[in-house]
Image (tube, grey):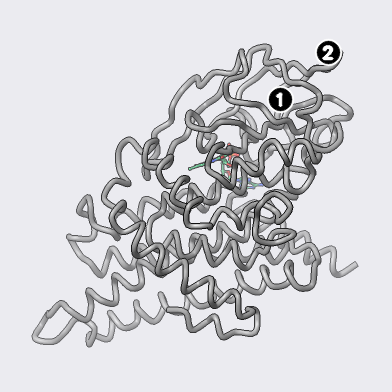
Amino acid sequence: MHDYLNWPFFENHHRVLAQDIDAWADQTLTPLAGKAEGDVDDLCKTLVGELSKGGWLDYVVPKAYGGKFEEFDVRSLCIIRETLARHLGLADFTFALQGLGSGAITLFGTNDQKQKYLPDVRGAKKIAAFALTEPKAGSDAANLSMTAKEMGDHYILDGQKTLISNGGIADYYTVFARTGEADGAKGISAFLVDADTPGLEVAERIEVMAPHPLARLKFSGVKVPKENLIGKPGEGFKVAMATLDVFRISVAAAALGFAKCGLIKAGKRAKSRKMFGVPMSELQMLQAMLAEMVMDVEASALLIYRAAWKRDVKKVRVTKEAAMAKLFATEAAQRVVDKAVQIWGGMGVVKGQTVEHLYREVRALRIYEGASEVQKIIIARKFLESLK
Ligand SMILES: Cc1cc2nc3c(=O)[nH]c(=O)nc-3n(C[C@H](O)[C@H](O)[C@H](O)COP(=O)(O)OP(=O)(O)OC[C@H]3O[C@@H](n4cnc5c(N)ncnc54)[C@H](O)[C@@H]3O)c2cc1C
């Protein structure tokens, strides 16, 4: 399972991390796996606490605030997400949101903001969320319409955000709103908004095919002090994109974890089930499916860890590499999990089976943090730029 860790993209501490988190996940997450359907709020809160106790949230905050490294080590984030996803999707979700919801503070926040939020994110005292999407602006996020009007030492926020992960259980939201310095992307700013701020309400809880805490939020005259502005006025879109740049590669890693889980489940089923007088795994059409699944998994891993290594070690922007990893790995995970369901036959679509859950779990990954079509545009643009 960990043979790819011998690739030159990794250092020894990554190999140790992979083994440690796998052992921790086996012990801690396996007993929780049966609770991943239905009301997931409590389970997510439990998981944040467990991830903190396990020391894994140390990887989402910088060293100066109790974290592991001076800055994000994307290979570690990917190893953690891949492993958590392989064991329990909601554990991966919880980990990712603590990172995504605090990433803007880590990258652009003031010392006071970092001091106030990051140790609590790490210590599971604050659940974080990232609120960019609106009912009329998802893929076209630069076109968002929530307003933030400057009024003395405050901003007043009005508008809506939707499909916000951790909506309803978060203690604070990183919110992007239009401050109007310019049209489009250059007129947006980023704010920290505590969940109990008057005027902020959870307008609707949204149920999705693989249960996650998700909500539509309504902001009516929400008063946010100026010290809660993250970065400079008008730089909010840059803040959002830089945060997503780090976490986009890790979405691909989560997809890889789901795909690996499906591959293992399919392989074991094929070896143990007899059909037409032989184990299923001896049927060549079945082997063809397995071969395609193995290729998809390993090609995803190559793209993911190449992108993460380049960002960590070469310290350059990896917009194209991250987009390629996200696009390929999320689409590949869908193919792999679909084949796993096929190999499991009728049992594959029975509620409660791991492959049935995986089938629902992987779908959203091709949509959020930039749909597949958006990734294609990024890759093509970067290629065309390179020809100049
Ligand atoms: C489970 C889940 C969790 C989420 N969590 C969060 C969160 O925590 N915070 C947050 O801010 N948002 C979150 N989102 C929202 C997510 O980021 C958006 O759903 C996503 O950006 C797509 O936006 P949209 O839903 O408005 O679809 P639209 O923007 O309407 O796009 C619809 C489809 O159009 C296609 N498309 C997009 N661009 C192009 C193009 N240029 N050319 C051709 N086709 C195109 C894509 O296939 C896309 O799926 C979450 C979504 C889901 C499903």
Read off the residue under disc 2. 151
Determine the residue located farthest toward the left in the rendered image. Answer: 277
Q: Which mark is residue 145?
A: 1
Where is residue 97, by image quadrant?
Answer: top right
The secondary structure type at the circle numbered 1 is loop
Residue 151 % position (x, y): 83, 13
Q: Residues within 10 Å of mark 2 (few under 14, many from 20)?
A: few
**Which residue: 20% across, 65% down?**
345
Q: Earlier in the sequence, mark 1 or mark 2?
A: 1
Residue type highlighted by circle 1: Ser
Bin the neighbour count of mark 1 within 10 Å (Cα to Cα): few under 14, some 14-19, many 20 and up: many
- Residue 147, quarter of the rendered image: top right
Residue 157 location in percent, x, y? 71, 19
Left or right: 339 with respect to 17? left
Residue drawn where x is 54% and y is 63% of the image = 253
Q: Is residue 257 above or below residue 164?
A: below
Asked if residue 213 is positioned above or below residue 21 in the image, the reply reads: above
Residue flagged by tag 2: what amino acid is it? Met
